[in-house]
Image (tube, rainbow, N blue to C red):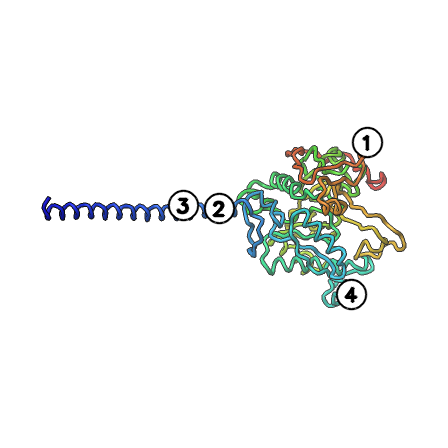
Amino acid sequence: MDFSQSWSRAKHTSLANFSFQNETAATRVRSARMARTWIVCIFSVLITLVIFLYPNSRTSSNRLNTTSDDSIFNRTLGFHRNYVLSLPARTDRREKFQVAASFAGFDVEFIDGVLSEDVSSKATPLNWKAENVGPGVLGSWRGHMNVLQKIVNENIQTALIWEDDADFDPALKQQLQKFATGVKALLPSTSSSSSSSPYGRGWDFLWLGHSKLGPSDNQTEFYVLENDQTTPAVRNRYGKWWNHKHSPLEASEDTTRLIFKAGNGGVGMYAYAVTYESARKALVALSVIPRDGAVDVAYRNFCKGAFGIEFACYGPFPTLIGTHRAAGWAERSSDNNVGEKGRWVDEVTADVKFSTMLNLQRLANEDEFVEAQWAGEDGKKELRRVNEPLNGAVGGLRNIDLLSAPPPSWMPSDAR
């Protein structure tokens, strides 16, 4: 082989090797690019899953994190804010409510309550009749108005407002989901659709915690939730059906909860929800136009249409949220009224079968069960698993002729 042939073959081999090396390098570059592309895709999918599966993360935005009914299971129960009215001095109540809310899985913001003596005489409604109400009622009214003012000032779209002695079932989120289904079924079809709130659109006031609540006489449509095992038996109920003339059979069934338009209003304000629009209405009706009594009485009349401003109220009976009384001297129980002095009272919660407050020790010990506060007909207190799904309750719309129903059994015959 002469020199030229050798050189030609060597050159050809070198070029082939160089080409192979270039192809290998190009393959490596393509592989690296493909790997980076896959990593970016996987990372994007993971971020999307986190956002979708965990809508409970806190946000500074006033908008709901999701438009789904599942937002009831977020840290604000499907509302934009949870406010708890509480006097700064009642650290005992604040601590108890805070820890109870943590076990039920929601966050709260405390709003300072107001003492009556701290309300300026110039800011007191001009027709206020102090002699007709308890000593703390003026401060209570002012505190509730302050919360409404905050909602309007900060453009909060929906808010759940609590009193600091409220109590609730550890499974409150599941209860609220069923309540929301009922409210949306009752709302006009144009209101319940296309809403960012899981509770629908078209309501002004959700009276979730009360001692009395009822519909107007001409109310015919109800959402009936049967086989609700969280409902207190009739014999253990403190709250009353608030319609003096007519009480349907369903209101006296041990495991039935009614959801309805509360055209007759109620009594007691352990917890209630408002919207931005209804907060403005309430400030006009209950503050700008002077009122002369307790705030729950004013809201009752508002729900009844007494103030010339349309105000749509909805709620459950029995109540979903009750009032808790800690063990101790009776005068500790209320900040609005002096009440009975010198008498020791036991711990109790009105109308909440599985009370979070009464089960705090079990929950702190990570017990598997919570206990009902009342014994059943067999003399035993029912136990329920902490994370047990409340699947038994079945709800649906029902037409009920209230006018043909008898008066409630608790109403004295001479007052009917």
Q: Residues within 10 Å of mark 3 (few under 14, many from 20)?
A: few
- Label 2 sits on a secondary structure element that is helix
Per the image, label 3 sits on a secondary structure element best described as helix
Q: Position of residue 158 (x, y in %)?
A: 61, 52
Q: Amino acid at mark 3?
A: Trp
Give the answer, above or below, for where 204 lies relative to 136: above
Question: Residue at label 4?
Answer: 117
Q: Nearer the viewer, mark 4 or mark 1?
A: 1
Looking at the picture, tell me which residue is in the foreground, 142 or 261.
Answer: 142
Query: Is residue 367 visible to us here?
Result: yes
- Note whether 400 is above or below 155 in the view shown: above
Instruction: Count the marks.
Output: 4
Please report whichever mark, 1 or 2, sits nearer to the chain's N-terminal start: 2
Crowd tier of the residue under label 1, counting other residues whose Cα lies within 10 Å: few below 14, some 14–19, many 20 or above: few
Label 2 amino acid?
A: Leu
Task: Read off the residue under disc 2.
Answer: 46
Q: Residue at x 80, y 51 (%)?
A: 326
Above/below status of 182 relative to 339: above
Q: CA distance from mark 4 to mark 2?
A: 56 Å
Q: Percent from the top left, x then y, of residue 185?
A: 61, 38
Say which element carries label 4: helix
The mark that comes first in sequence, 4 or 2, is 2
**Could you say which is closer to the camera, residue 382 or residue 398?**
382
**In the figure, is residue 304 to the left or right of 277?**
right
Q: Which residue in the protein does label 3 denote?
A: 38
User: What's the distance in space between the residues labelled 1 and 2, CA to CA?
Assistant: 51 Å
What residue type is disc 1 on? Asp
Q: Which residue is mark 1?
A: 378
